[in-house]
Amino acid sequence: MIKKIYPAIHHFLVVLTALLTLSTVPVMANEKTVALTESELNALIDARIEKALARYQLDNGGFDAKVEKSIITFIGKQQDEQRRQQAEVQQRQDAKAKYVKPVDPKQDHIYGDPKAPVSLIEYSDFECPFCKRFHLTAKKLIDDNPGKINWVYRHFPLQFHNPGAQKQAEASECAAELGGNDAFWAYTDLIYERTKAGGKGFPIADLTPLAVEIGLPKAPFAECLESEKYAQKVKQDFAEGAKAGISGTPGNILRHNASGQVVVVSGAQPYERLQQALDNLNKVVAKK
């Protein structure tokens, strides 16, 4: 009966019994150990389980209920522990994120209203495939919340994506020098649109032609890029991001600029997660 009702338990007990070398048991037959056949072993297991059920006054339904309750309790405890660990990680990230450099309209590249109360500060890598995907998500968030939040782009080129990611970051700074904030975002948008990502997704040789494509002068741009005049600025962005707890890209920090209240939203999060984080941050600030 047990084999039919509880096949998994029965199979487990058969294996366990075999491992414990219980396939032979002493019986009263001239006081010698007699080997059991498979059918005899199954009958013995059935008898022992039936005895256990009777001892604890459990019918089959009661046994199932006990097992189900134990499984649900176990899963619940695991989920609670996972939530606790996630909360601890979030708290540590938010604590580090308080060191993020405040937004400076004179230094930062800002998409949206520069006077918006909240900034999405993204530390990004032009060769990161997740950054490529996140780029359009971040833009939509700003467009859907005019005057409420802006987007600040800072560089965080990962070593294994260099030299491409580093040179692309420098090129975007050259675009900003020659064409201002609008040119920076136009140049950035095109790189993300065309790169295949992964470290070699956009040829360094094509960085100057891309600048010409958006209307920037070829010779001055090429000179700027070759001089590496913005190499240190890119490295400084990286160092400041690391100080604020950024370890991967896209590294996103929502910052309420007046209060300094921050929340970390790591990775290429979906639009709904970003919107929820923005709404929650505004609620927290409103209560203080």
Image (spheres, rainbow, N blue to C red):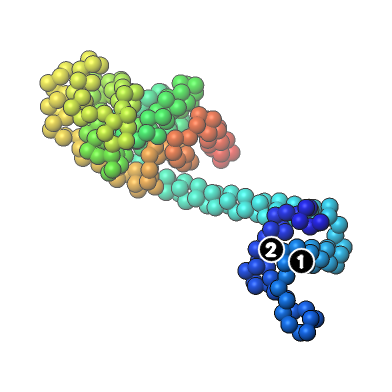
Residue under circle 2? Answer: 14
Secondary structure, mark 1, is: helix
Determine crowd level at label 2: few under 14, some 14-19, many 20+ residues with C-alpha closer than 10 A.
Answer: some
Quarter in which the N terminus is drawn: bottom right
Residue at 74% in and 79% down: 26
- Residue 33: where, in percent of width, then height? 72, 79
Secondary structure, mark 2, is: helix
- Residue 186: where, in percent of width, then height? 31, 20
- Residue 44: where, in percent of width, then height? 78, 67
Residue at 40% in and 23% down: 112
Q: Is residue 202 left or right of residue 53?
A: left
Question: Could you say which is closer to the camera, residue 209 or residue 123?
Answer: 209
Indicate which disc residue 278 carries. Answer: none
Give, as a three-letter code, the residue at label 2.
Val
Indicate which disc residue 40 carries. Answer: 1
- Vertically, is 275 above or below 183? below
Q: Is residue 152 left or right of residue 184?
A: right
Question: Of all residues shown, which one is farthest toward the front?
Answer: 30
Lower sequence index among marks 2 and 1 = 2
- Residue 156: where, in percent of width, then height? 31, 39
Mark-to-mark CA distance, 2 and 1? 12 Å
Residue at 71% in and 58% down: 9
Of badges 2 and 1, the one in the foreground is 1
Question: Could you say which is closer to the camera, residue 186 or residue 41?
Answer: 41
The answer to whether residue 28 of the structure is visible from this angle is: yes
Give, as a three-letter code, the residue at label 1.
Glu
- Vertically, is 61 above or below 240? below
Q: Is residue 76 left or right of residue 270?
A: right
Total marks in image:
2
Question: Could you say which is closer to the camera, residue 164 or residue 141?
Answer: 164
